[in-house]
Image: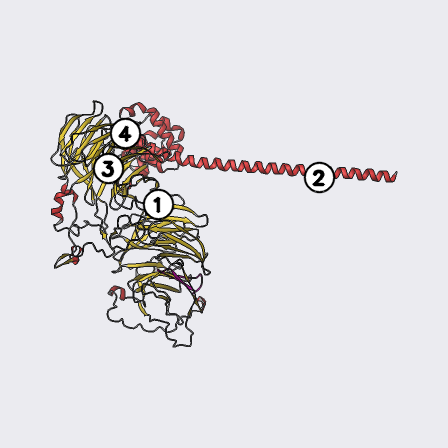
């Protein structure tokens, strides 16, 4: 097995905090999720997580006007310059203080960053080659409190900055003679948004108390005059010095309350308040939390703490409509370039919504688990992932699109485990509310609810290979309950364990149930023989997780002392063990009074999973690492670091000395009264608003791991979300039976000689993906069955695996389907004899075919509807044309009759 897996996608979370942004074409929304950035394509309904991550949670994202660059800033002010074209990090920079907002100028030449009470204007990177991508141009002082928002004029001549001191400041990007700075008041609360009118200096300002001020300028943008002689910048006042590297370049501009003095003959820009409007007319106190303005259509969108948003048309302040979209505060609002779609982010619930206001419908509606994820399961074909969380929800995600397509909310307490049945169309979940529920993925409904005679909290779950038996282990009564999926009746209660049942697993080939418990045993229950205990395996410590190898010939058990032991279920003998405690490398929490080395002694693996081929085992637990062990060699093969986000607890081995005082760690000094960092804990039962200030820092851990049945990816539910790691073929050079004669030149020579089978064998011996694809696509379509028949048996499986992987992404659908059909028809019996070994390959092939079948079915249905519509339209027009022709014929007949009558009358007169 190859271990060249790389991070592929982040599921289970769509938005955490920070500002939303739309792409240049308006068809994709860019959302910060923790310390990563996800891009949601609204046209193709897919999601992608960029392969970049910051040290802490992201708070601000600034997009360049051409959509090629993004500046991503985290909580501490560390910034990354990211190319959205190549998905690569181009530059690292540190602002040294938290950044509240960042905005590029419309011409793409500058960008402004606001931190504390200063606005810093930088030259935008990418216009020319430079060593330092972030070159400071000017520093603007004026506000006395933290700055909150920025907006630019359309011609990039001026920008406006809002502040928490209730003032708004207009600054010139250049040294204009008639506009250096201008301060505006008029509000009684902090400024949430400030917006310029299109091609004008006229302003709208919105404050948190729900007040909108309309400001009119007496000067047009064309009337701004450049200053001839630049004044020397004054030396900085003491206490307001910036960092030395920032001050090395750049000019300092200081503003005072009011307008600057008119020393020249040039008339300075003046503002006048035209009108004032209020959102909270009913008198209910509802904080305005986010605002966005679309200049061409003059639409103002405002979001409130109650989850309501308003659409107003300015400057008349006409309400278009208002709607409640969440029970939590709206954190961020964005409008796309066309003004049709509005994006909303709600950090409290982890919601991301895109609303089309003209048709009043959702374009996109996603929500992650807003508490920890507890469990996950892959469908048998690897297309779907089901997850369960502490919020009591069960969600099913599509691995191709990365989006959730159904959410089940029937559970009233935390979901502890989920699994699929062998058919792939039924999801079963266990919960602490004392129920096990089965969901139908055809009709999206809860069709079975299993309960115990006495209330019990279910912590483990398993379904047998046939999908007939459902078992769940209780953590309070130490019993295992068995139900029939068909009837929903309780069949048996298995008693015998003397501690909570931590994990259950059915054998993939026989009707035997393995149960691990805190009583230091694993029991094997025979379902065919009156549910008797077949074997009892003694453990050295409490059992936490148990899993069968895909062929059912081996059992892996994780225990509390950090060991993984391997057992033969037939002989009940131990075949090996791995001591994995040192591989966990746990970090020290801020509130820990002991070192990480000491706390690691009580850490262990809590989740185990075999790879699809059974050669390796994946292990994760109370750590930021996921380990892959080789079962045969019983050694560590690779460790994956699932996160580098220091916003989580227990990430670092040693505590930061800057947080240490003579009384100990700062985290221990005032525990419970948070200062805004971490996750807000609301009071139980509170639905709207909470004046408390309790926060906690989530601890990094892996709660569940699963390998995809196709063997090409694996997934982990972590504090960060659902992380998917896929096989990276580009990093592996793994030749098979390499020789001096096996070169690309010799392979292409065989192609020229039309020795197709020989060329394929040589290409698979060299094992380079591009070369294999070239050889395969050069073979004529008519020769495919002949070539498949002459291939050696050892290369048939390799070719089938390559066809399955290529079919998923290639556009040559019929060509690769022909290869798959020929291989299966000609070598079907030999492949059937080795079905256990090639099962992942066949499941990958099935997944690819199913995906194409679904997309083609959708396309064909759409085309059929179009054809029917066109036929009905033409038929309607034909009927209409026929009626018109009949009317014309009738008119002609009447005319001819009139003419004949007239001629007869003329003849009578002549006679």
Between residue 471 and residue 794, name the one nearer to us: 471
Are the residues at dot 3 and dot 4 in contact (C-beta closer than 8 Å)? no
Q: Report whether residue 680 is seen.
A: yes
Name the front one of labels 1 and 3: 1
> What is the number of the mark on residue 891?
2
* Circle 4 crowding by C-alpha within 10 Å: few under 14, some 14–19, many from 20: some
Q: Quadrant of residue 411?
A: top left
Taking depth in this image into account, of 436 and 729 the one nearest to the observer is 436
In three-dimensional space, the C-alpha distance between marks 1 and 3, rounded to whole angstroms, equals: 34 Å
Give the label, 3 or 2, closer to the camera: 2
Q: Is residue 200 magenta?
A: yes
Q: Which residue is mark 1?
A: 366
Where residue 419 appears, as percent x and y from the top left, is: 27, 34
Q: Secondary structure at mark 3?
A: loop
Single out the mark in the foreground, 3 or 4: 4
Q: Which residue is mark 3?
A: 2
* 891 inside magenta stretch: no
Q: Quadrant of residue 247?
A: bottom left
Residue 711 shows in the view: no
């Amino acid at each position: 097995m190859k271990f060249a897996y790389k991070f592929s996608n982040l599921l289970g979370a769509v938005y955490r905090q920070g500002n939303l942004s739309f792409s240049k074409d308006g068809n994709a929304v860019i959302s910060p999720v923790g310390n990563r950035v996800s891009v949601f394509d609204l046209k193709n309904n897919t999601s992608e997580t960029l392969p970049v991550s910051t040290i802490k949670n992201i708070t601000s994202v600034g997009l360049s006007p051409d959509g090629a660059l993004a500046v991503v800033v985290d909580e501490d002010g560390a910034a990354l310059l990211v190319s959205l074209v190549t998905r690569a990090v181009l530059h690292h920079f540190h602002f040294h203080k938290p950044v509240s907002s960042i905005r590029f100028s419309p011409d793409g030449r500058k960008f402004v960053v606001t931190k504390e009470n200063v606005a810093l204007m930088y030259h935008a990177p990418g216009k020319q080659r430079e060593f330092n991508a972030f070159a400071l141009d000017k520093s603007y002082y004026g506000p006395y409190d933290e700055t909150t928002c920025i907006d630019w004029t359309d011609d990039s001549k001026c920008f406006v900055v809002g502040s928490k001191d209730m003032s708004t400041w207009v600054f010139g990007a250049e040294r204009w003679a008639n506009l250096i700075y201008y301060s505006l008041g008029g509000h009684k609360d902090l400024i949430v948004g400030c917006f310029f009118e299109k091609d004008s200096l006229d302003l709208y300002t919105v404050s948190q108390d729900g007040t909108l001020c309309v400001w009119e300028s007496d000067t047009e943008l064309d009337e701004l005059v450049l200053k001839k002689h630049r004044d020397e910048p004054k030396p900085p006042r003491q206490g307001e010095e910036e960092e030395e590297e920032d001050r090395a370049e750049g000019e300092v501009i200081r503003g005072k309350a009011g307008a600057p003095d008119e020393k020249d003959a040039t008339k300075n820009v003046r503002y006048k308040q035209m009108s004032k409007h209020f959102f909270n007319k009913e008198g209910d106190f509802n904080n305005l939390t986010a605002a966005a303005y679309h200049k061409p259509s003059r639409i103002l969108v405002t979001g409130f703490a109650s989850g309501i948003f308003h659409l107003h048309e300015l400057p008349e302040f006409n309400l278009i409509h208002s709607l409640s979209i969440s029970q939590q505060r709206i954190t961020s609002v964005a409008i796309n370039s066309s003004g049709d779609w509005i994006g909303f982010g709600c950090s409290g619930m982890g919601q991301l919504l895109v609303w089309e206001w003209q048709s009043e419908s959702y374009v996109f509606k996603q929500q992650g688990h807003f508490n920890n994820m507890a469990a996950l399961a892959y469908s048998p074909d690897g297309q779907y992932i089901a997850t369960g969380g502490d919020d009591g929800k069960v969600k099913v995600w599509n691995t191709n699109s990365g989006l959730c397509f159904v959410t089940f909310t029937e559970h009233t307490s935390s979901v502890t485990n989920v699994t699929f049945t062998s058919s792939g169309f039924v999801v079963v979940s266990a919960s602490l509310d004392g129920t096990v529920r089965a969901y139908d993925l055809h009709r999206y409904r809860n069709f079975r609810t299993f309960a115990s005679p006495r209330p019990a909290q279910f912590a483990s779950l398993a379904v047998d290979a046939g999908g007939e038996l459902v078992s769940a282990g209780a953590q309070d009564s130490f019993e295992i309950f068995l139900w029939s999926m068909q009837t929903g009746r309780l069949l048996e209660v298995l008693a015998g364990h003397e501690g909570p049942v931590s994990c259950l697993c059915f054998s993939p080939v026989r009707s035997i149930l393995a149960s691990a418990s805190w009583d230091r045993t694993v029991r094997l229950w025979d379902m065919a023989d009156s549910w008797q205990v077949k074997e009892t395996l003694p453990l050295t410590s409490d059992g936490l997780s148990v899993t069968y190898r895909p062929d059912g010939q081996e059992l892996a058990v994780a225990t509390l002392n950090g060991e993984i032991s391997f057992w033969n279920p037939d002989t009940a003998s131990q075949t090996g063990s791995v001591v994995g405690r040192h591989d966990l490398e746990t970090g020290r929490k801020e509130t820990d009074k002991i070192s990480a080395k000491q706390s690691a002694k009580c850490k262990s693996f809590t989740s185990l999973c075999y790879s699809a081929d059974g050669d390796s085992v994946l292990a994760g637990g109370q750590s930021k690492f996921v380990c892959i062990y080789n079962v045969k060699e019983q050694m560590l093969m690779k460790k994956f670091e699932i996160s580098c986000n220091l916003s989580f607890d227990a990430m670092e081995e040693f505590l930061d000395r800057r947080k240490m005082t003579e009384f100990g760690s700062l985290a221990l000094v005032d525990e419970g009264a948070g200062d805004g960092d971490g996750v807000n804990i609301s009071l139980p039962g509170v639905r709207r608003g909470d004046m408390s200030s309790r926060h906690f820092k989530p601890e990094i851990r892996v709660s569940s791991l699963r390998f995809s049945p196709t063997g090409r990816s694996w997934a982990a539910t972590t504090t960060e979300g659902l992380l998917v790691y896929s096989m990276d073929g580009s990093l592996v050079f793994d030749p098979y039976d390499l020789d001096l004669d096996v070169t690309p030149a010799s392979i292409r020579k065989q192609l020229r000689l039309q020795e197709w089978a020989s060329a394929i064998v040589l290409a698979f011996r060299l094992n380079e993906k591009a070369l294999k694809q070239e050889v395969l696509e050069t073979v004529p379509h008519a020769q495919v069955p002949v070539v498949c028949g002459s291939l050696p048996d050892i290369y048939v499986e390799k070719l089938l695996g390559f066809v399955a992987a290529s079919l998923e992404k290639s556009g040559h659908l019929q060509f690769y389907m022909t290869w798959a059909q020929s291989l299966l028809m000609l070598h079907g019996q030999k492949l059937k004899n080795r079905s256990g070994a090639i099962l992942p390959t066949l499941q990958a092939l099935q997944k690819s075919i199913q995906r194409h079948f679904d997309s083609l079915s959708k396309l064909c249905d759409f085309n059929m509807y179009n054809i029917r519509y066109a036929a009905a339209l033409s038929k309607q027009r034909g009927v209409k044309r026929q009626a018109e022709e009949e009317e014309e014929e009738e008119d002609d007949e009447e005319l001819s009759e009139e003419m004949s009558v007239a001629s007869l009358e003329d003849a009578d007169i002549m006679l």
